[in-house]
Image: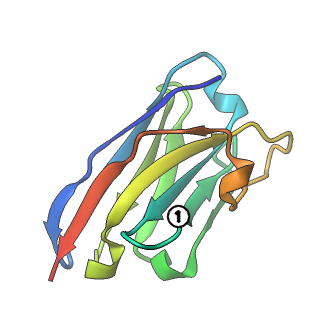
Amino acid sequence: QVQLAETGGGLVQAGGSLRLSCAASGRTFSSYAMGWFRQAPGKEREFVFGISRSGSDTNYASSVEGRFAISRDNAKNTVYLQMNSLKPEDTAVYYCAASSTVGVHTMPTKTYEYSNWGQGTQVTVSS
C-alpha cells in the first residue's frame, strides 16, 4: 500500500498559477499509475490528469487542456500538477490517487480504478 499527501493548494486570482505536489510513502511508487482528480461542492469527483508508471504517457480532461500539466519524479516518490491560467471553475478540492495497474502505459480515468487516495488540498480561484 502507498500513502499519499497533497500540498500546494491555496487561493489564487483568475489567470494565476499553482503547483500541487503529491508525496507518496513506500518503495513501490514507480509501480503505480498516478492520477489527479477534483471535486467541487455538490459535484461528483472528476478526473483531471493521469500519468503512467514511468511517466512516459499522460492523459487529461478536455477542460484542462493546454493549461495544466502533470509530471512525476519516481526518485522522489512525488507527482506534480502544474496549473496555469486558472479559472474560477477550477475551484475544487484536488486529490491525487494511485492505481496499481498492470499495464506500463495504462492511465485509468475512473475513481474505482484507483485504490489509494490522498486527503485532498483546496484550490480556490477568485474572479
Q: Dot 1 lies on which element?
A: loop
Q: What amino acid type is highlighted by mark number 1?
A: Arg
- Which residue is at 50% across, 78% downward? 65
Say above or below: 23 vs 66: above
Residue 64: % across, % down? 46, 76
Residue 75: % across, % down? 53, 25
Say above or below: 9 vs 40: above
Tell whether 62 sits left or right of 95. right
- Which residue is at 53% across, 64% downward? 45
Tell whether 31 sits left or right of 68. right
Residue 106: % across, % down? 78, 52
Q: Nearer the viewer, residue 89 or 17?
A: 89
Q: Residues within 10 Å of mark 1 (few under 14, many from 20)?
A: some
- Which residue is at 71% across, 52% downward? 112
Choose top left, top right, bottom left or bottom right for residue 34: top right
Tell whether 107 sits left or right of 46. right
Say above or below: 45 vs 90: above
Q: Nearer the viewer, residue 115 or 56?
A: 115
Tell whether 98 sits left or right of 101. left
Residue tagged 1: 45
Which quarter of the figure is the C terminus placed in?
bottom left
| Total labels drawn | 1
- Which residue is at 85% across, 45% downward? 103
Question: Is residue 100 at least partly visible in the picture?
Answer: yes
Residue 27: % across, % down? 61, 16
Which quarter of the figure is the N terminus placed in?
top right
